[in-house]
């Protein structure tokens, strides 16, 4: 029997709090899960710093990746006898679902921003590089690893396969909304996934939804909207993200100016040098990063030491509503006053912006063209979702943006320049109520 067709002698199951059970029968999938590259995802949290806001959010990208795989497994099981679905794409779809987040690093978005990295590129590098993952995929068929990488990169020729893990209603979103809601303890992210899976239908280049399932999709979209603003963009989480980003920024600056570390950032060297070595990347997980943050609290550099101590002990910045585009005069004055008190505004006065577009229809020529969700009508015609749903129409194409200014009130309270401090507090209080990051 060919490796691609090989089945385990007994089906393996993972007990899962979201999907109850995750089923594995294919030898290829079981072997991929056992690789060091996939096991590394156990040491990368799914929600980064969100556990500092919602203490239960300790789940990993390993959990999520298995969940996406399971949802795709269920979808294609339902598709098996339907027109337009090619059963030969089954294993490709399962592998792409399982491996779609393979390239995420520790606190991925903050880490990527400072070092100008791209986790999606690392995902492809792991799949196509000298790795256990690559060897397994090439055992399936020569060039199979490239097919998997192309599906994840959204460049694969069969866009129906791509849409299973990358669209406005895909297995990735359906898993992380429910999983993140479960572990954060909120009620926003729950929706009737079983109903959605039952009404999904494959057509030539995408998955569509039977019109009878419209209300389940409305619930899904509103769940996503609520999760973004109540969980993913929570200001306390964003405060921790700000400090995290500034730690990485400070470490890189100190390295660039030749600072002598008490504990050298050995695991970051290739990133400082702009070479982003794959082997070094795979050895970097959140346990390693926490180790450095722990020991850097004792560094001689006051800024690095303070930022690490804040992050490790959850002494976060306070914040106010603040848009520098509309409050430029106050922004410039605050910058000058912070420097006057000896507090470096590059690290301690930070505007953070969050934005989300909950649903959009196809707008040709725009930078990010989104394939809309289509409803399959009883006549066989396709209707774009927002044209049928008043709820979805009300939020379609409406991008919401939120701006906040973060700063360490405790450092301001300890400053010696009483007149300068008073001016700073007057400006901050004049812009809006100061809120604790608690």
Image (spheres, rainbow, N blue to C red):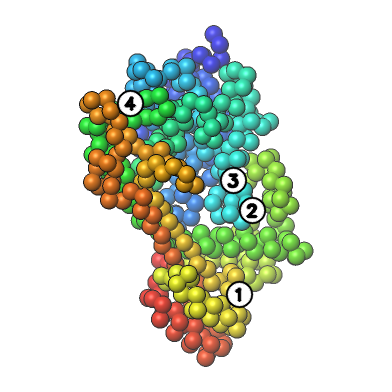
Which of the numbered marks, if any, corresponds to residue 201?
A: 4
In this view, the residue farthest toward the top is: 1
* Other residues around mark 1 within 10 Å, as few (<14) / some (14–19) / many (≥20): some
Q: How far apart are marks 2 and 1 (CA)?
A: 21 Å
Quarter of the image for residue 120 reads top right
Could you tell which of marks 3 and 1 lies nearer the N-terminus?
3
Report the mark closest to the observer, 1 or 4: 4
Q: In this view, does 196 lie to the left or right of 166?
A: left
Quarter of the image for residue 37 reads top right
Q: Which of 390 and 233 is in front in this view?
A: 390
The image shows residue 305 at horizontal and vertical percentages of: 62, 67
The image shows residue 28 at horizontal and vertical percentages of: 53, 21
Q: Distance between the residues labelled 1 and 4?
A: 56 Å
Q: How far apart are marks 3 and 1 (CA)?
A: 29 Å
* Mark 2 lies on residue: 115
Could you tell which of marks 2 and 1 lies nearer the N-terminus?
2
Quarter of the image for residue 80 reads top left
* Mark 3 lies on residue: 118
Does residue 304 lie above or below 329 as drawn? above
Could you tell which of marks 2 and 4 lies nearer the N-terminus?
2
Q: Are marks 1 and 4 in contact (CB under 8 Å)?
A: no
Q: How far apart are marks 3 and 2 (CA)?
A: 9 Å
The image shows residue 323 at horizontal and vertical percentages of: 45, 69
Residue in the image at 62% along x and 22% along y: 143
Could you tell which of marks 3 and 4 lies nearer the N-terminus?
3
């Amino acid at each position: 029997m060919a490796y691609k067709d090989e089945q385990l002698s007994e089906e393996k199951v993972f007990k899962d709090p979201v999907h109850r059970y995750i089923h594995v029968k294919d030898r290829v999938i079981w072997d991929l899960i056992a690789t060091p590259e996939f096991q590394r995802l156990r040491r990368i949290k799914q929600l980064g710093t969100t556990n500092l806001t919602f203490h239960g959010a300790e789940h990993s990208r390993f959990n999520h990746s298995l969940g996406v795989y399971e949802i795709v497994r269920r979808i294609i099981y339902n598709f098996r006898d339907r027109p337009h679905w090619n059963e030969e794409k089954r294993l490709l779809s399962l592998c792409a679902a399982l491996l779609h987040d393979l390239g995420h690093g520790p606190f991925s978005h903050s880490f990527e921003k400072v070092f100008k990295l791209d986790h999606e590129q690392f995902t492809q590098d792991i799949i196509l590089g000298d790795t256990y993952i690559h060897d397994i995929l090439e055992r399936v068929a020569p060039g199979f690893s490239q097919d998997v990488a192309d599906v994840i990169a959204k460049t694969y020729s069969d866009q129906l396969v791509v849409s299973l893990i990358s669209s406005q209603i895909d297995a990735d979103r359906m898993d992380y909304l429910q999983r993140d809601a479960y572990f954060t303890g909120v009620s926003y992210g729950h929706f009737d996934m079983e109903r959605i899976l039952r009404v999904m239908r494959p057509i030539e280049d995408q998955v569509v939804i039977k019109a009878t399932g419209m209300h389940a999709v409305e619930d899904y979209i509103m769940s996503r909207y609520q999760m973004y603003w109540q969980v993913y963009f929570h200001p306390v989480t964003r405060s921790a993200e700000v400090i995290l980003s500034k730690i990485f920024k400070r470490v890189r600056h100190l390295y660039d100016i030749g600072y002598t570390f008490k504990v050298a950032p050995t695991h970051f060297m290739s990133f400082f040098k702009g070479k982003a070595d794959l082997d070094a990347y795979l050895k970097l997980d959140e346990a390693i990063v926490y180790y450095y943050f722990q020991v850097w609290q004792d560094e001689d550099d006051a800024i690095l030491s303070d930022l690490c101590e804040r992050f490790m002990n959850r002494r976060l910045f306070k914040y106010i509503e603040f848009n520098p585009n509309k409050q430029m005069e106050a922004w410039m004055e605050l910058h000058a006053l912070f420097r006057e008190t000896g507090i470096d505004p590059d690290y301690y006065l930070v505007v953070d912006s969050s934005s989300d577009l909950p649903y959009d229809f196809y707008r040709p020529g725009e930078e990010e063209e989104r394939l809309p969700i289509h409803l399959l009508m009883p006549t066989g015609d396709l209707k774009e979702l927002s044209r049928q749903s008043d709820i979805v129409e009300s939020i379609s194409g409406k991008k919401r943006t939120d701006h906040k200014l973060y700063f360490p009130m405790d450092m301001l309270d300890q400053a010696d320049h009483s007149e300068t401090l008073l001016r700073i507090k007057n400006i901050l209080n004049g812009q809006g109520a100061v809120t604790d990051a608690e």
